[in-house]
Amino acid sequence: MPIKFKITKTDSKSRARCGIIYTPHGEIHTPAFINVGTQAAIKALQIEELKKLGVEAVLCNTYHLMLRPGAEIIKKAGGLHRFMNWQGPIFTDSGGFQVFSLGFGMERGLKKIMPEIVEGKNPSTPSCSAQGIRKKLAKIDDEGVTFRSHIDGSLRRLTPKISIQIQEKLGADIIFAFDECPPPFASREYSKEAMQRTHKWAKECLKFHRKFSPSKVEGQALFGIVQGGEYEDLRKESAKIIGAMPFDGFGVGGSFGAACSKKPLQKTLNWVISELPEAKPRHFLGIGGIDDIFYSIKAGIDAFDCVSPTRLARQGILYLLPKSGGSIKNKFRLHISKSEFKKDFGSIDENCGCEVCKTYSRAYLNHLFASDEILAYILATKHNIYFIQKLFREIREAIDEEKFDKLEKRWLI
Amino acid sequence: MPIKFKITKTDSKSRARCGIIYTPHGEIHTPAFINVGTQAAIKALQIEELKKLGVEAVLCNTYHLMLRPGAEIIKKAGGLHRFMNWQGPIFTDSGGFQVFSLGFGMERGLKKIMPEIVEGKNPSTPSCSAQGIRKKLAKIDDEGVTFRSHIDGSLRRLTPKISIQIQEKLGADIIFAFDECPPPFASREYSKEAMQRTHKWAKECLKFHRKFSPSKVEGQALFGIVQGGEYEDLRKESAKIIGAMPFDGFGVGGSFGAACSKKPLQKTLNWVISELPEAKPRHFLGIGGIDDIFYSIKAGIDAFDCVSPTRLARQGILYLLPKSGGSIKNKFRLHISKSEFKKDFGSIDENCGCEVCKTYSRAYLNHLFASDEILAYILATKHNIYFIQKLFREIREAIDEEKFDKLEKRWLI
């Protein structure tokens, strides 16, 4: 087995649990937050700083790396670990999510599902102008997806086999099966079709993965992905079918977050997780809201990846502890660019123990953002990563000590 | 005295010398390269990394800081050292250079001197479009300069008194007198006028500096600036007059670099330095070319400040040692974004001992620049600062061991 998963503690009041994923490049203590390094780099941060901030694993994006610099170059460089100099565990996703986000499944009848987006009438939805969609076309068939590179417009193709081949070259410790992620608000019919294709592709991924990685000990772990949209029967069916396949772990896919309210996220997880094997790790793809993290862990999720701590940082949005005024209402966020911080010589979060909070004032960070200094992004990123990793350490401790419900209350009052 | 300067070695074959400037925030070993942190931040670098890279002192720009965040805020934050968390020596310039660069001295008859620039006929000159100049107007009178902020267009004023007051609030260890820097190609008449104003303002700066910093022990060192354009008699006159004033050190000002060929730079320094007192430090403002550094040190310069190592880094231009192919011809520069480095798995400079060269490949840096990752700027900046600081260490050692001429030959063959 390329990875081992040991559950070290199960919460008596919820499905929350603590564990350790043993990978060829070290341990990941779960529940874990995996920071995202899309293009083989954590934005605004030197890789050697991650460990100091408590990060154990990173996730890179297959879609971006296959286009630039290309999987072959990373393989020749000695794989992702060597290329980006991160010696800890690495995940790669399958490329599916980005390809489907680009194309929004238009060719598969998306226009019927969400005409207002295709016609550009809902500008609040990402990448939804009519022109944008036409340009960003991806064409899905039962074997895979043909799409245009966002970098040079060249025609590219991803299939289960190609995705596994690319991820094999990238050399991550944990890779994901190629799935079809249906768009938000997808109809039952569309969601079912996408789910069925996902199941077919899952089998193909397993087949090709075995072929490419015959030595399972040194090889990569492969996680299957559960789909099924917002439909209970589909989600349960998908979890049952994918959960029965010999994957090393499971991802829960789908478009949550911006498009959906919180309730479906919790409901969906409850449907899915009751059908997944207990003994294998469960990863929630692309989720990073503080409240979502609590709900998901309670439902039995072991790992998350999300760009939010680093992306928010670059927007001048800094996490704030409950003790310092953070709450569900303000999403635990402080907007440091606001003029009220121009003369605020206190630290960003007086209860945070990170280097940035111990060293710099709100006034200095406000100045750096106003001046568009790269240092603004560096310092904000350090704070946000420290914050999210510290939260996960506290969550693990709380589960261990049967205090997870109390911790949740303290955060989500 | 706020600073002390000890000359520890003088080259027997040139005016080159080694020394130590003792400041309230530590020592600066000369010849020294002072890295520039324009807006109270070294671009793309955390301040605590500077020491590891060999940096002893930084220079911040009064013009930028007076406009944003404002001298009052920095004073309230406890001064620049505390605001930006740099506990080593800090220089600030007077704001003059930026103000005159903005205005290009138009109101003082620049149109007669360089009509092609005012009319926008020479687009290769920075900020030279007719519209640009009209917008970027600065109006000079015998008491100071009125100009518009490049940030919000508000009308602002700098005089010797105001510049000293602002620099006093910023709290650097070494500050500069407010001078008028004539534009490149300035006529004799214009250069003389600017020089005379500079001398008048130098006296005023000294007067106000004494008033504001009565306790000289804890106070700031004030450097006077020699002007005089490209005219031998003016340069000598300026050096004699400024050199006789009770400044703690001297800066050589003027527009060299892009506008002038190398010869005038060397000639100018020879005229100037023979007139300046031996016992005080001499700073060459804004110079950073590798060849210029050698010529200037040979002529007797003790310190430099320049944005070039950090600015070039952000453009993907990395310094290269002579052993690794760097030369006057290629300006010791490697353009890492070139496609030839896409598959180059060697280090940036195999003979460089910096962390970046020891850790990352040219292919990775090429990828980071192609992907516009902030990490590209961080790593490139670290390499370039390490390179320039190591060169200065070698220069100091060479002078100490009477081998400066040999070192120069090895670099400038």
Image (cartoon, coloured by chain):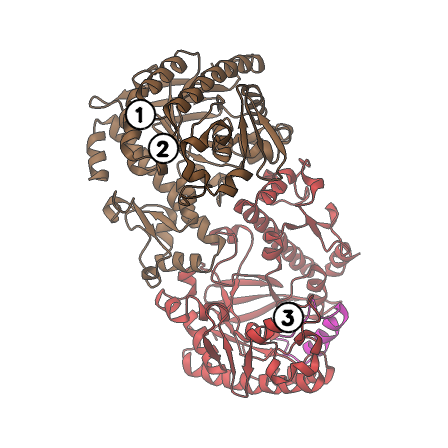
Chain colours: A brown, B red
- Give the number of the disc on residue B32: none
Q: Is residue B85 visible?
A: no
- Asked if the stretch drawn in magenta spans residue B261, the answer is yes
- Give the number of the disc on residue A256: 2
- Asked if the stretch drawn in magenta spans residue B265, the answer is yes
First in residue order: circle 2 vs circle 1: 2
Q: How busy is the neighbourhood of tag 1: few (under 14 within 10 Å), some, or many (20 plus)?
A: many
Q: Secondary structure beneath disc 3?
A: loop
Residue B123 coordinates in the image, percent (x, y): 68, 67
Which residue lies at the image location 49% right of the left edge and 82% below the top edge?
B159
Q: Secondary structure beneath disc 1?
A: helix
Find disc 1 in the rendering and name its residue. A268
Which residue lies at the image location 59% right of the left edge and 80% below the top edge?
B180
Do the numbered discs 2 and 1 sit on residues whose CB atoms are within 8 Å?
yes
Which residue lies at the image location 49% right of the left edge and 43% below the top edge?
A43
Find disc 3 in the rendering and name its residue. B129
Vertical order, A36 against B118 (above or below): above
Residue A411 coordinates in the image, percent (x, y): 23, 39
Task: Output the chain of dot 3.
Answer: B
Q: How busy is the neighbourhood of tag 3: few (under 14 within 10 Å), some, or many (20 plus)?
A: some
Are both tags, 2 and 1, on one chain?
yes
In magenta, the rendered stretch is B253-279
Q: How busy is the neighbourhood of tag 2: few (under 14 within 10 Å), some, or many (20 plus)?
A: some
